[in-house]
Amino acid sequence: MLRYKKALIYPPLDMPLSEHYVVPLQEYGKPEARVIVRVNQRVRRGESLTASEHETTIPAHAPTSGFIEAIGLHPAPHPSGEPGQAVVIKSDGRDEAALPLSRPWTHWRSATTVQLLALIHQAGITGLGGAAFPTANKLLSACGNIDSLIVNGMESDPSLQCDQLLMQIQARKLISGVAIAIHILKPRNCIIAINQNNHASLSAMRTALKTMKALDNGVEIVALSPRYPGGSERQLIHTLTGIEVPAMMTPISVGLLCHNVATLAAISTAVIEGEPFYRRWLTVAGEGLVQPRNLWARIGTPIRDTIRFCGGFSSRSHRLIMGGSMMGFELPNIDAPINKSCNSVLALPEAHTRPPRPCIKCGACTAACPVGLLPQQLYSFSRTRNLDKAHTSHIQDCIECGCCEVVCPSTIPLVQYFQSAKGALQVRQQSQTNAQLAKQRHEARQTRMQREQTEQASARAARRQTLRAAGKPQQQPSPDKLIEAGRPGEKRRHPSKEP
């Protein structure tokens, strides 16, 4: 694992209103929501823009008041550079709020689990640690199935500061969110993991925990060594409990649930204040920026506006990274907006690295891998598209932290190869699943047709037997009907056309 020295925290500022907001309608990998607004319609801050028609659909809300200017394709915050569906809102400068999602629940302990989960889903809260999985679904699948709730406040990427800042400024709100999650999940204990170098965050969280009289001694704050990628879900679980989550399985399968601190703070805002999730803390930093800052920014804010508010670029040669210096991706378009899973925008100088050279089999990547994989072999299998061997070598366990790529003396983009191979494996698995489902549907259809034929034959036999028992001759069809029906294997002929 890689050690790092945390930089001084940047000043927190409330991002002023932008002229336009571009609200993405889809978090990548999730179904697209159905738009319920129209062009030229006026909306208010917090008003729903979409309707949830699927359990994994994430509702979107207006970040400010204004008019719907357009609904359609717009540059999206994704490494592919492909546009995505979005709602463009022109701000009217009034920032008028809509009615709250519900009445403020100061006594939320009297609410049922179903009521709380419905409100969390309606608020559009997703996992804010990067995966963007719908929080209500995650809580629902863990209800009554976990022993421990783990609150992730590690923020191990050296370029990120938004979670650290949230724990200092909104510690009481975060602890309230922890209490709500405990009320829903009813775990045996709760562990809040914080970087031991973030002294201000530790102090604020411990003070806020003491003021929450309703929380018993089952909540523990643990200070951990700042080792990258110690904030990764599986790495954090292993550090705290010694449990290794099996490949292709979730922590819930071993009785654990991990939530990011920003997610729990958003839950508190939705339940206690009745506000949907439409803004978050965002670290805007990097050597290519004039004034690095932590911004309280709204979802849909164009990245161009955040760069301008931080003084612009300090040099002409720069590149934008979203999601952290280690696990982030390069943004192909500065006009892309901030989405719910965006926690940082970094302006870094252009990387002047030499082109990749052949692997020298030095083993540095193997020593650096925090998961215990063999990146050298995985690179060979991924480059030659040997997906079967890549699968048996546990490429699915790769967390794409980038440690192997940093230490590689040949400057091979290992993570790109691993991502490509994992994507190909996922496509192949999906194709196999679709083929299996099609086979099952075909077999079910054949079985149904055979059953229907058997039932029809049995009904005909029963009818004939009933007629014989009644002593009635079976009704014979008239000659006209026989002519119309024709004999088997012959074409129908009309009586008038008989020779």
Image: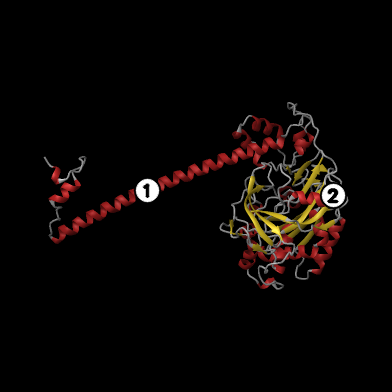
Q: Quick one: quadrant of the N terminus?
A: top right
Which of the two labelled residues, at mark 1 and mark 2, occupies the earlier sequence position? Answer: 2
Q: Amino acid at mark 1?
A: Thr
Residue 26, position in %: x, y? 63, 52
Q: Is residue 287 above or below residue 240?
A: above
Residue denoted by label 2: 311
Q: Amino acid at mark 2?
A: Gly
Q: Quadrant of residue 15?
A: bottom right
Q: Nearer the viewer, residue 483 or 242?
A: 483
Circle 1: element type: helix
Residue at position x 63%, y 67% from top? 113
Q: With 83 as the anchor, is 6 left or right in this view?
A: right
Q: Quadrant of residue 354?
A: top right
Residue denoted by label 1: 447
Classify 10 Å Cα crowding around label 2: few (below 14), some (14-19), many (20 and above). Answer: few
Q: Gap between marks 1 and 2, in whole Å?
A: 69 Å
Q: With 236 as the anchor, is 385 left or right in this view?
A: left
Residue 456, position in %: x, y? 28, 53
Q: Nearer the viewer, residue 183 or 429?
A: 429
Label of residue 405 in the image: none
Q: With 284 as the anchor, is 81 left or right in this view?
A: left
Residue at position x 61%, y 66% from top? 114
Residue 115, position in %: x, y? 62, 68
The furthest residue to the front: 40
Q: Quadrant of residue 385?
A: top right
Circle 2: element type: loop
Q: With 373 as the anchor, is 72 left or right in this view?
A: left
